[in-house]
Amino acid sequence: MADNNVREFDVIVIGAGAVGENVADRVVRGGLTAAIVEAELVGGECSYWACIPSKALLRPGTALHTAQSVPGAADSVTKVLDPVPVFKNRDYFTNKWQDDSAVEWLDSAGIELVRGRAHITGPREVHVDGKDGTSYSLKAHHAVVVATGSTPVIPPIEGLRSVPYWTTRGATSAKHVPGRLVVLGGGVAGVEIAQAFARLGSKVTIIARGRLLSSFHEEAASLVAAGLRADGIHLRLGTDVASVEHKDRSFNVTLGDGTVVSCDELLVTTGRRPSLDNLGLENVGLDAEDGKHLRLTTDPSGLVEGAASDGTSGLWLYASGDAAGAAFLTHQGKYEARATGDAIVARAKGTLHGTPKPWSSLAKTADEYAIPSVVFTDPEVASVGWSFKQAVEKGINASSVELPINVSGSQLHSENYRGWAQLVVDEDRKVVVGATFAGPGVSELLHGATIAIVGQVPLDRLWHAVPSFPTISEVWLRLLEKYGL
């Protein structure tokens, strides 16, 4: 079908997930017009298939286990979860995979929604194959923003691509609890979904080539491994998968040593990559490696560097969130989106020239120093900033303070509480540059650590931040005492 007349906006955002919504909102607040293009549900991966439904599936099991761990409550609660109300609660939080409320919000914010698949055809030019069968030509006066999120990486295992495996989308939207579930991958998504289904009644096996949660401190990961084993999850770590086959409604997973593990559902959680396929980036001088693996290099405001953004066409192409390839985390993507949107407005108004200053509202500086991350298993792992190894590699004169979490707050939280905490300190500046906490409920400790790192709070001043008694936050006092304050 031929294109309709060209429609013009100040900014065109490709992708209406959390990141795209935030970019569009910021530019509209700044006085510009914006259109947002989305081929699927407005609200994106996090709302329907990732953060929200996975936590809705996890939380009932964690709450039940916490009650079972508290003397005085343990005798008053059931020992098993009923999957029916758990799935019903998950469906409530995903709005049953309907995006009407998200669309209403776009309209109330003054953001134009174009449903369809976007293809960049030239500088500031986007063609959309509409879901209604109509084609659209869009023109941006100032910027096009790529906010298309990420997509699963599927490993080259013999037979895998020909079987009906789950990715996180299949698992978080599941309508049944499989009797046997095999999870390929020991990262965050793999362990979270594994524990959720184990507590719903599945017999779960995790198969991973390396150790569990390899991007987190081994001490923290070992506490999660113990929690998973306590839920009956079988861990096959340091294990390769040779092949996969699907027969008679079940899967046979053959390991590198010839062992066969059978299951009713197979979940693949072996990483994600920026979702940049078929966007037309080659039309503006950005050739995707092998046609699909381009990682956009951006300045602190999300501006894409290279032929697409300089020369006669000016500075116009931005990437934010997972599409920019930095941190695949919703909260960090939204932070990046706010910086990107504000920078676009500032450049349009002529108040920003060149690269924005670090730590300004137009720069995503925290991506370099303080990315907070939580593994919502039971026990949890919460981490922000640099590990000790990363700090040393960056040339920091670093030290590490580590101890078990054993304070009055943790003892009251649950019987036999086990936890661990670490601070990484820059000895030259005497500030915290990294922190990790592991244990039940520790995610609520993380923002304090994030503030300490971003604010570069001196340790001798941090000493005066007195934790309330009796809370798990008292571990901050114990860490600083062990440091020598």
Image (cartoon, rainbow, N blue to C red):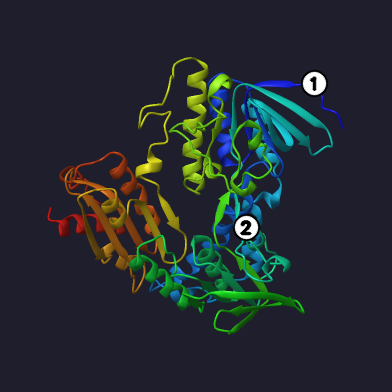
Q: Which residue is identified by label 1?
A: 5
Q: How crowded is mark 2: few (under 14 residues within 10 Å), some or many (20 or more)?
A: many
Instruction: Give the total of numbered labels.
Output: 2
Question: Residue at image x 52%, y 28%?
Answer: 341
Q: Where is residue 294 in the image (x, y as percent from the top left)?
A: 57, 44
Question: Residue at image x 39%, y 61%?
Answer: 216
> In the figure, is residue 350 to the left or right of 254?
left
Give above or below for 219 relative to 49: below
Residue 407 visible, this orientation: no
Amino acid at the residue labelled 2: Arg
Q: Which residue lies furthest to the left in this view?
A: 484
Amino acid at the residue labelled 1: Asn
Question: Residue at image x 24%, y 65%?
Answer: 403
Q: Which residue is identified by label 2?
A: 90
Q: Where is residue 325 in the image (x, y as percent from the top left)?
A: 51, 45
Mark 2 or mark 1, which is nearer the start of the sequence? Answer: 1
* C-alpha gap between disc 1 and disc 2: 42 Å
